[in-house]
Image (cartoon, rainbow, N blue to C red):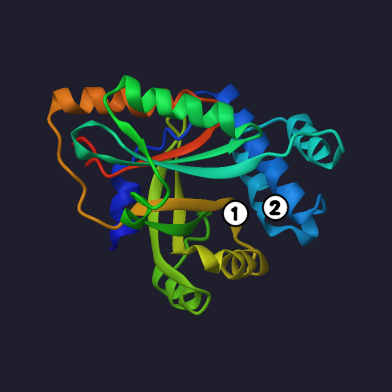
């Protein structure tokens, strides 16, 4: 198994705290996808993947339709995807992704979180080289029709996949399902999604992640508490869509 597997294994799947926040952030991503590729799902692969993810998160149909409609309105805000870079305390690098219609507001907020926790917001390029930009897809395995992982990986290599592995996912009711995780370079997004759709796999989500390409740094419990506070402040900001760090996760 490679670095993506270890990253996924250790990183908790709490991307966004609660349901309302999840819907808000997915809505922004859908709006951006429509502005970039149009409202027709047949010609917009990114929108198709986001709608699949929204459905897996039980986002109401009217919320999805509202986000699509908002992007087509002339008076709608122009959301932009921005990446902020910084160092938290104890030398931990942070990469913060955001979708905002007001960069002045968002950068001020992000800077205040770093300052409050003893870190510093840095200039572009300060920490980005410590992460690899990857596309990632989740497909659901049908228990009645187990997927041959080796065969799937061999097929997907030709489409740009770099790592393919299975993981168990437990929902709030403690029901366990098996998902296939597929990682590749971010430039392979369209090819991999096309293969998944053309071969009838049950797509749960498709998106992008930043995976640390350096050894993750161990911290003490006290240091982790401070770093977790910074991460929490960032993740709670409605403009922030993802937070990545070079901190080694706590042992589970």
Residue 16 falls left or right of residue 35: left
Residue 157 falls left or right of residue 62: left
Looking at the figure, which quarter contains the C terminus?
top left
Q: How far across and how far down the image is residue 211, in percent? A: 36, 53
Which residue is at the far right?
A: 74
Q: How far across and how far down the image is residue 115, in percent? A: 34, 24
| Closer to the camera in the image, 50 or 202 | 50
Please tell me in which quadrant of the rendered image residue 114 appears: top left
- Disc with the residue nearer the chain's start (1 vs 2): 2
Query: Can residue 157 be spotted in the picture?
Result: yes
Residue 99 falls left or right of residue 8: right
Say whether marks 1 and 2 touch (CB < 8 Å).
Answer: yes
- Under tag 1, what secondary structure? strand
Please tell me in which quadrant of the rendered image residue 162 appears: bottom left
| Closer to the camera in the image, 76 or 162 | 76
Q: What number of labels is visible? A: 2
Residue 205 falls left or right of residue 148: right
Looking at the figure, which quarter contains the N terminus?
bottom left
Q: Residue at x 42, y 32 (%)?
A: 14
- Under tag 2, what secondary structure? helix
Q: Residue at x 79, y 59 (%)?
A: 42
1 vs 2, front mark: 2
Residue 68 vs 41, above or below: the answer is above
Q: How far across and how far down the image is residue 248, in percent? A: 22, 42
Tell me the tag on residue 224: none
Q: Residue at x 20, y 35 (%)?
A: 250
Query: Can residue 173 be spotted in the picture?
Result: no
Tell me the tag on residue 48: 2
Q: Residue at x 85, y 33 (%)?
A: 75
User: Label 1, on which residue?
Assistant: 203
Q: Dot 2, how many residues are within 10 Å of its Cα: few (below 14), some (14-19), or many (20+)?
A: many
């Amino acid at each position: 198994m490679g670095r993506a597997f270890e990253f996924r294994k250790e990183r908790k799947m709490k991307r966004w705290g609660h349901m309302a926040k999840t819907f808000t952030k997915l809505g922004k991503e859908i709006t951006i996808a429509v502005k970039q590729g149009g409202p027709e799902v047949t010609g917009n692969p990114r929108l198709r993947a986001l709608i699949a993810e929204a459905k897996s998160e039980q986002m109401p149909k009217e919320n999805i339709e509202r986000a699509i409609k908002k992007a087509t309105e002339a008076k709608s805000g122009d959301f932009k995807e921005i990446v902020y870079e910084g160092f938290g305390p104890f030398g931990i690098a942070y990469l913060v992704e955001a979708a905002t219609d007001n960069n002045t507001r968002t950068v001020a907020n992000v800077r205040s979180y770093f300052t409050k926790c003893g870190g510093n917001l840095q200039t572009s390029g300060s920490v980005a080289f410590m992460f690899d930009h990857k596309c990632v897809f989740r497909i659901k395995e049908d228990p009645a029709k187990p997927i041959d992982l080796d065969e799937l990986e061999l097929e997907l290599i030709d489409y740009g996949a770099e790592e393919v592995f299975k993981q168990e996912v437990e929902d709030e009711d403690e029901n366990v399902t098996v998902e296939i995780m597929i990682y590749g370079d971010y430039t392979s997004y369209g090819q991999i999604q096309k293969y998944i759709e053309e071969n009838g796999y049950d797509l749960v989500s498709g998106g992008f992640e930043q995976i640390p390409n350096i050894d993750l740094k161990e911290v003490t419990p006290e240091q982790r508490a401070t770093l977790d506070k910074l991460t929490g402040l960032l993740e709670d900001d409605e403009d922030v869509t993802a937070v990545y760090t070079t901190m080694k996760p706590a042992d589970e």
